[in-house]
Image (cartoon, rainbow, N blue to C red):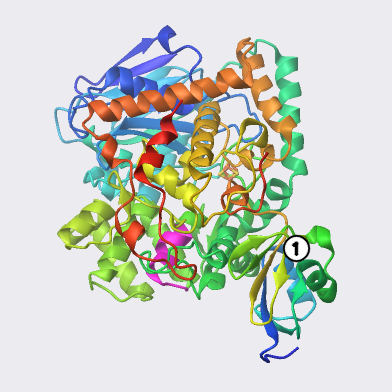
Amino acid sequence: MFYRVNMGTLTVTKEAGDQYQGLGGRALSSKLVETEVDPTAHPLGEKNKLIFATSLLSGTGAPNGGRMSLGAKSPLTEGIKESNVGGAMGMKLGRLGVRGIIFEGLPQKDSCYVVKVSADGVVVEEMPQIKGLDIYAAVAKMQEKYGEKVAIACIGTAGENKMAAACVGFTDMEGAPTRQAGRGGLGAVMGSKGIKAVVVDDSGAEKLVFADEAAYRAGAKKLANALMAHPVTSQALPAYGTDVLVNILSEAGGLPTRSFSSGRFEGANDIGGETMAAVNKERGGKSGHGCSPGCMIRCSNIYKDKKGAVLTGGFEYESVWSLGANLGINDLDDVAMMNRLCDDYGVDTIDMGVALGIAMEAGLAKFGDGKAAIALLQEVGKASPLGRILGAGAAITGKVFGMRRVAAVKGQAIPAYDPRAVKGQGVTYATSPMGADHTAGYAVATNILSVGGKVDPLGAEGQVDLSRNLQIATAFVDSTGLCLFVAFAILDIAEGLEGIVEMCNARYGWNKSVDEYLEMGKQLLREERLFNKKAGIAEGSDDLPDFFRTEKLPPHNTVFDIPKEELNKVFNF
Amino acid sequence: MSTGKQAIEIRFFMFLAELCKERGWTSPMSLEIGQDITGDELLARLDIPAERVEVLLVNGKAVWPSAALIQPGDRVALLPPGTPGPYRVLLGFKKLN
Ligand code: SF4
């Protein structure tokens, strides 16, 4: 069932949405955007729509199956945007039988609305007392009103002020807003519609009906077994979280340091997963925290300050990189404080960190000065003119300060893997319809890849094929509602992927093959690209900023050298 | 162990960082090798079982221990199985057929 919430008239209608049969997650949110949003619409205008979509396995409690997808035309990239998020909401919406919510129109007055979803339907309520509050404070007020058990999606100062890098914060299983639909400025779209928060209460939900429950359980067991057997998902991620990648990427020469001027950070170990795990142990924080129901991998964490008070959670590799290594900062407490501020103001940590790096290069603060970086970030919270510039993301910040080295594609900042040293990732940054996005090419499963031999990360060969296959497989996994990290296990254990396909089939009574699911991934990518084309994003923008092609990255001293014609071949399918 | 010219610099990551601590080593640690050695020889010298190491990064490039040749002056990192995600593919740890 779909709900359509019109913020102009404050009315809600219910629809069956038969035309969206068989779609979930990113495939569903992108389809809705593509069908319902005029590609030339202003992202903050009346004609843009914000989509909340659940996934094929939402509500089932599948291993790591709790994710959902947000979609809209992005104020950051001006193209189609899907932002995938964990937390508690996906499961609850799934249990309520909600496949999608379409928020449309613009409010007639400047108020502050909360949209409440429950077994009784959807209502729009005014809640002026939370206007202007940071996310943690607003969430606490809503928990007083709606109870501790609800799932909440909320915007902060950045979203209310329609900053182009604003995110939407989601509560985790403990009710802390540590998970973000981070990228592409969807918080600003939500702000433009006057929606401060969406609250979901699933009490009284009816039991989910499976087409074939026994087959579903058998499939779920296969995936669970793969996740438990694999060293990445069963040991490394719970112990160290994704932050374990800091030391690895730095050693491999691909950790962008001081605004993409080196691939190796001498302070990597100070902010890496090994150190974070030790700090969590010492201060009574937590490693091995699951962000959403059914998570068996538990890559998330709760990070405490020196006095033992909770400072932040969901403290991930990309954020540690953007607010740490990328700024030359090796003090993990300073980086954690910045992560907390980003989550509280509701701004994407990746675009924010890259914007701060550009500001530092422009002379607003010195690389390595954590306190100065925190002060700059606080400007975002105040929505001062400087804060609004930074909060508009890396590309705008670069323009305002007249900088030449701006690591962004289609207006969205490049994340934590330097494309000169991890070239396959570079191809994905250049070509993804989402703008530079590290998760666009995340899912990898040997049995659905056809890349011959071993890929040399520093060489040009094989990278386009690799990126293509990664993007297609990812588009599929993104649609199931499974956390992309299951891909770590299905890469090596073929049974895992079988399990996923069997679960989806058994949930709905389908008989689709892996290839058919992958075809859904391909179709999705085609449609997203078509939207971008109609939105005026030229094919020529499928490339990296030129400094990656001319400026050598130490220590390997390589440039990004995959010819543009080769990049165009990514979408040869 | 010394820091002489014939030495290599070794780093230990993830579970191997814990092993390194247990044994009272430092990371980075300097190890005198005198002459070129293979990755397997290095692991034997360190008394680390082969199954605890997925890949070595020798001067920042991924190589399997059996294929690695380490020379004095090299910078080597030891990675156990557990590097998440597509990075085992993107960084060339894993071969795809
Ligand atoms: S593996 Fe990490 S991101 Fe995925 S569901 Fe679990 S805690 Fe969340």
The N terminus of chain A sits in image quarter? top left
Q: In the picture shown, does residue A471 fall above or below A138?
A: above
Quarter of the rendered structure image containing ligand 1: top right
Q: In the picture shown, does residue A63 fall above or below B10?
A: above
The answer to which quarter of the image holds residue B29 is: bottom right
Where residue A79 sits: x, y (%)?
28, 34
The answer to which quarter of the image holds residue A208 is: top right
Where residue B25 sits: x, y (%)?
74, 80
The answer to which quarter of the image holds residue A61 is: top right
Q: Is residue A316 left or right of residue B68?
A: left
Q: How many marks?
A: 1
Front-most of residues A524 and B71 = B71
Q: Is residue A223 left or right of residue A84?
A: right
Front-most of residues B37 and A500 = B37
**Would you say residue A398 sits in the magenta stretch?**
no
Q: In the picture shown, does residue A90 fall above or below A336?
A: above
- Residue under pointer 1: B65
For residue A437, say whether it is visible. Answer: no
Q: Residue at x 54, y 30 (%)?
A: A481
Element carrying mark 1: helix
Q: Is residue A216 left or right of residue A544?
A: right
Give the amino acid type for the residue marked by disc 1 in the picture. Answer: Pro
Q: In the picture shown, does residue A171 fall above or below A42?
A: below
Where residue A427 sits: x, y (%)?
43, 45
For residue A296, say whether it is visible. Answer: yes
The chain to which mark 1 is attached is B
Q: Is residue A74 left or right of residue B9?
A: left
- The stretch of residues the image draws in magenta is A319-330
Front-most of residues A447 and A388 = A447
